[in-house]
Image (cartoon, rainbow, N blue to C red):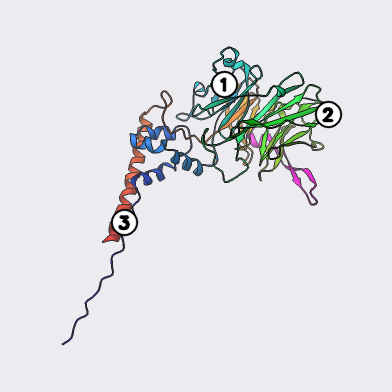
Amino acid sequence: MTHRRRRTCPRPAPPMNLPDDDDILSEILLRLPPLPSSLPRVSLVCKRWCRLVAAPHFRRSFRARHRKPPLIGFFDDFVGIFFRSVRDPPDLIPGKRFSPPLRDDKGGCGSDPDKWRIYSCRHGRVLLYSRTQKEILLWDPPTGDHCRVAVPPEFENEEKMIWNGAVLCAAAGDRSHVHGGFNSCPLKVAVVGVTSNHTQVFASIYSTETGNWSDLVSVTLPFEVHTVTHPGTLVGNILYWMPLGLGYGIVEFDLARPSLSVIEWPSGAKFKGNGCCRIVLTDDGSLGLAILSHHRLKMLERKVCSGGVAKWVLEKSHKLQKILGQRSWVEVILGYADDINVMLLWIDGTIYVLQLNSLQCTKLWKTNIICRNHPYATIYDSGLAKSGSFVLDGYVFLFCCCFSVLYCGITTIFYSRYMSMDS
């Protein structure tokens, strides 16, 4: 009598741990572009979606995924302080939406926009200074968060005058760092000025983490210096300014030490007017100069050769006619943003945005006003729709419906695969 061997069936695999529906939805929403309308639109769909995009961990993940911020617009302080968006609807932000919080308990000139000047826009923050109040204002435009800091009296008196400054994330030198919210990410503020005898430039750093100013450091320039009008350029952990006076030079402010030093101006680099030259980043993130001369854009780079000797070399030179697609007569540099390597140009009555890495040029609008502008770029993760900012119109409804269909489709596919594996 033969016995049949009982066929043993393999044990079924343990059930997979299904991710929570919120996890799937968050992964979808993280892929939205970091534009002003993206998350506010999503927050209007339902309470659940609003809760997801408003969560701190979602915002951190959103910033980590979109490391390079888009250009939102620019500030100018020609008449008061005015913001103008470079985006089209629905990402266009009204100027009043980004109005700086200048009101204080003291009243008077503390709330007068004409008494304040914008010194810097970087890492989503804006730095303003009031010589009358002797205060700096740190401001996050999307959220409205801000703080005021008094400047020590020895920085602004008969012997010294502050002319410029810079705001940056405290961990700006760490490339793996993700810039967070106003209260979660410590900031540094650097101020730079000129002595009354026009021979020295001085600087100091303020830390929001410690609440203290560093000791003043200074350096003597080989020419008579009057002012430091252009915003500083951040290269690694070093800020560079271009003092203006009866000569040319670059001031290097090492934030780690801190210390000041003077870099020799490249020989033969001449330009007409202070609106034709800016300290910029090169394609590989090194120190460079952008000069408009004879209807050409010249890019110089400071390279360190063998033996530790640094010298300036011409990296590239392009005709503006080739970049713009047309001839030009008058060219002025209005502003520059080192965190996105973008320059604002005024050319024959029209404002252009020039991406220095790709040399792609975008025409914005016509204007006869030539003034200093500060490009503003940020990862827009405010999350919640604010009153009067965005409206759930037909396009938004269609957008939300598409995402709902996509979400349901991915969920259905996932569950169908899981059930097939279980059977």
Q: Which residue is mark 2?
A: 223
Q: Amino acid at mark 1?
A: Phe
Among the two numbered marks 1 and 2 on one chain, the one whose residue lies closer to the N terminus: 1
Q: Amino acid at mark 2?
A: Phe
Mark 1 and mark 2: Cα distance apart in space: 35 Å
In reply to whether residue 323 is colored magenta, the answer given is yes
Q: Secondary structure at mark 1?
A: strand
Residue in the picture at 37% in, 28% down: 393
Do callouts 1 and 3 mark residues in contact (Cβ within 8 Å)?
no
**Most foreground residue, 218 or 80:** 218
Q: Is residue 227 visible?
A: no
- Identify the magenta region: 297-326
Mark 1 and mark 3: Cα distance apart in space: 54 Å
Q: Amino acid at mark 3?
A: Arg
For the C terminus, the quadrant is bottom left
Q: Measured from the top left, where is residue 22 in percent x and y?
A: 36, 44
In reply to whether residue 236 is colored magenta, the answer given is no
Q: Measured from the top left, where is residue 339 in percent x and y?
A: 60, 37
Q: Which residue is mark 1?
A: 82
Q: Specify the quadrant of the image occupied by residue 114.
A: top right
Among the two numbered marks 3 and 2 on one chain, the one whose residue lies closer to the N terminus: 2
User: Which label sits on residue 71?
Assistant: none
Q: Residues within 10 Å of mark 1 (few under 14, many from 20)?
A: some
Residue in the picture at 78% in, 45% down: 310
Could you tell whether 320 is left or right of 30 in the image? right
Q: Is residue 137 visible?
A: yes
Q: Which residue is mark 3?
A: 417
Mark 3 and mark 2: Cα distance apart in space: 74 Å
